[in-house]
Amino acid sequence: MSNTILRMHEISKDFSGVKALDGVSLEVERGQVHAICGENGAGKSTLMKVLSGVYPHGTYDGTIEFEGAETAYKTINDSEADGIVIIHQELALSPYLSIAENIFLGNENARNGVIDWNKTNREATLLLARVGLDENPATKILELGVGKQQLVEIAKALSKRVKLLILDEPTAALNDEDSDHLLSLINHLREQGITSIIISHKLKEIRKIADTVTIIRDGRTVETFSMRGEDATEARIIRSMVGRPLDHLFPPRDPHIGEEILRVEEWNVYHPVDTARKVVDNAHFTVRAGEIVGFAGLMGAGRTELAMSIFGRSYGTNISGRIYKNGKEITVRTVDDAIRHGIAYATEDRKKYGLNLIGDITVNVSAAALGKLAKNGVIDRNREYATADSYRRSMNIKAPSVRSITGKLSGGNQQKVVLSKWIFSGPDVLILDEPTRGIDVGAKYEIYGIINELAAQGKAVIVISSELPELIGMADRIYAISEGKLTGEVPRAEATQEVLMHYMTAGKG
Amino acid sequence: MTDTLTQQPADLHPAKPRRRMRIDTRQYGIFGALAIVVLLFQVLTGGKLLFPLNVNNLILQNAYVLILAIGMVIVIIAGHIDLSVGSVAAMVGAVAALSMSQFHLPWYAAVLISLLVGAAVGAWQGYWIAFVGIPAFIVTLAGMLVFRGLTLVLLTRGTISGLEDPFVAIGAGSLGKTGNPDLITLLIGAVAVVGLIGMGLRTRRTLKRLELPREPAGSFWLKSILVSAAIMAIAWLLANAKGTPVILVVLGVLILSYTFVLNRTVFGRHVYAMGGNLFAAVMSGVKTKWVNFFIFVNMGVLAALAGIVSTARADSAVAGAGQNFELDAIAAVFIGGASVQGGVGTIGGAIIGGLLIGVLNQGLSILAVDAAWQQVIKGLVLLIAVAFDIISKRRSGGR
């Protein structure tokens, strides 16, 4: 038998014209740990979803061979039947069921629909021993920490006689101790002949555990190399991850930077559920008038959490720290406070937090500043219409009219509606979280133009982005954030992708 | 969660601006259903449904559904539900009757106290829902039991009947007659028709000026003529019965004011915004807790009004009053096109849904259909109406 367990050949996948994968090939040797690296949005997760049948056969181009036979998975169940198990970043366990029940969920030890609890618990105990989790199988999932939940997921995978285990950023939510345990478990599984694919941003981790690494960028394979070679360095991985030509053009801009508008000091935020976990750790930063400040960080680094906690404590618990606006300390307890103090936050997830998708453009544009259009609580609808229509024209929102339902607009036009809403609220500080995510190139250019225009008007603009070229192309100054800490502050002249990526993967300390 | 996988980016090249709007089949659907049900019962009852006195009774007997539907549609647009309105109406009816019979208060004081009790009940439930965060389903289920129980406590000495005449007139009286047919009623009908068409024309003019899509003129006039004919027909029938019922005037005022509140005020906009996307509303600075609180205060007041009206109409406060009121109101709102997910619904739709329920109630009782079967039929009508709505939406591919 060939030693190659998995061969994905020329996989392409597009979403209504946007290419997420463009001819990716991947070969995984049996019994190895194979790491896949790439920036956010490079296509790693899409590739794994193609492999596991989340995107069914027929919705992508290219071929997949598993153990020498071509696959045509229609559902996850099909791929699991062949022994391919994917463990997602967000764990898929049922919190009120026990460990044993979760391990065998959908795959119960039952006869005529009646569960054999003795067998279930016996097998669960054996599986827990294999993953090194010392817990009673009757313990409910919600009593376990994330690290132990991860182990339950792996036990569940083992119960399905996994041959190829895919872990999507398994340590992203774990502390150091849990991470170490997980990595040694993966090592241990390798000794038992289980092949793993691990998607990770953490280079130290990759060096520690991976035999081979494949780097994906912009939906294409950049290179695959053995981690045992002399030239397998972190620098090489970073170079391959980011080494893309600056293919976006940025509109020209002549920055006029004025006085400091916003200063945040000693900002600490804890996770809303796991209240012991610090999500933002002692952040200090400033933004000045007319300045565009970038925040660079990988997914889960705490960028959005930082922004949302400042925007009226809309994220997190036990928030402490000080916010100064124009030199004076302000209290911002609610979103309404934030808006009144001239702070605006355009979310990274416009469908969930940004728009009323069943509402038209008009009601969305006016949503954050209805008071400006109302007298005694009665909305002046003609002025509201005129306002929305003027934004439709100035922002070039492509829609038949401002009565068009926002849910039916393209991503770029939806984003322009969100920006219109916040610009209409009349802010001095705009926090734009991933302003160009999921948007085609033409609309991106327009949005860069809008951002430049806002800075030119003397507003303080914060741009959070996963796309480093975008930050380097636009920002006057870039803060790098990693694991909740601001790990670096880089002026425009010194900002390169390598420098930023170095700070972004810096880790603790 | 699931739809992130299936959702596709919307089409990148939107169609050229259309100056004409597609005819709103959904709106016509409810009108059509109402017309069909009326015609059906007209035939089945051998013409009795539209006897002048029966039309008068239809309005008097079903006013509570319409009043409750107005409050309920707001609750449902915001993404909640209120199961307690029937019990609240019964309790308030008892309060009103006790105020007059026990404490010898004048009728207007009794009405005022009743409305205040309604507001207090609403504030109580609103507090738990908005500020403690208990789902409205639970809070109002508890309220349904609590207020029913309190009604029984208030009426331990049995039914209170023989209420003051002006009070009874709220639910059963009319503005009086100037002759046969009553000219005042016909005049009110005519004013309503002129006002309706005038407002429709004004909206069309504004839309034209703003170059927004409008309903085709033919469809607008057809609809206007049909609605006008229906209003004048009802006016004619009422003019030949007892004249304009007092409650119809109250209803007219409620419908106009609440349509204004939902369409024109910041409060109304916030209700729709919260139902459409609660997170987006929070992140836009909407004070969602207070909005939720006032939605339930308002529902409490309207439930109290429904209690006053039905107590007045019955001329007595009974412990078993208001049974299944909440179900009629909820059914009316959903038949009227509101969405179970929230964010969608209109006062007009809820009123038409309420009329449909009313016609069913009236028609079935004229036919002397057994109460058990009346429930079966009403249940099926609700199911079919919402199923029709969901299937037609799925077919058109919209939400």
Image (tube, coloured by chain):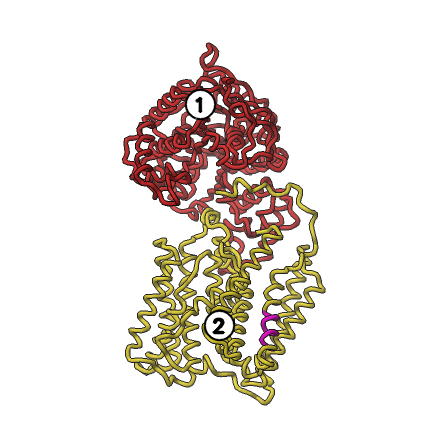
For residue B374, the mark is 2
* Residue A257 in view of the camera: no
Q: Please state the extent of the stretch shown in magenta in the rendering.
A: B34-42
Please give the chain letter of the residue carrying mark 2.
B
Q: What secondary structure is the stretch in magenta mostly built from?
A: helix
- Name the foreground residue: A273 vs A55: A55
- Is B39 covered by the magenta stretch? yes
Residue farthest to the top, as pictured: A230
Chain identifier matching the red colour in the rendered picture: A
Q: Is residue B200 above or below residue A69?
A: below
Quarter where residue A136 is shown: top left
Look at 70% across and 47% down and name the residue there.
B16
- Name the foreground residue: B191 vs A490: B191
Answer few, some or many: residues within 10 Å of disc 1's Cα (few below 14, many 20 plus, some between 14 and 19): many
Asked if residue B139 lies left or right of residue B24, the reply is left
Quarter where residue B36 is shown: bottom right
The three-letter code of the residue at mark 2 reads Gln
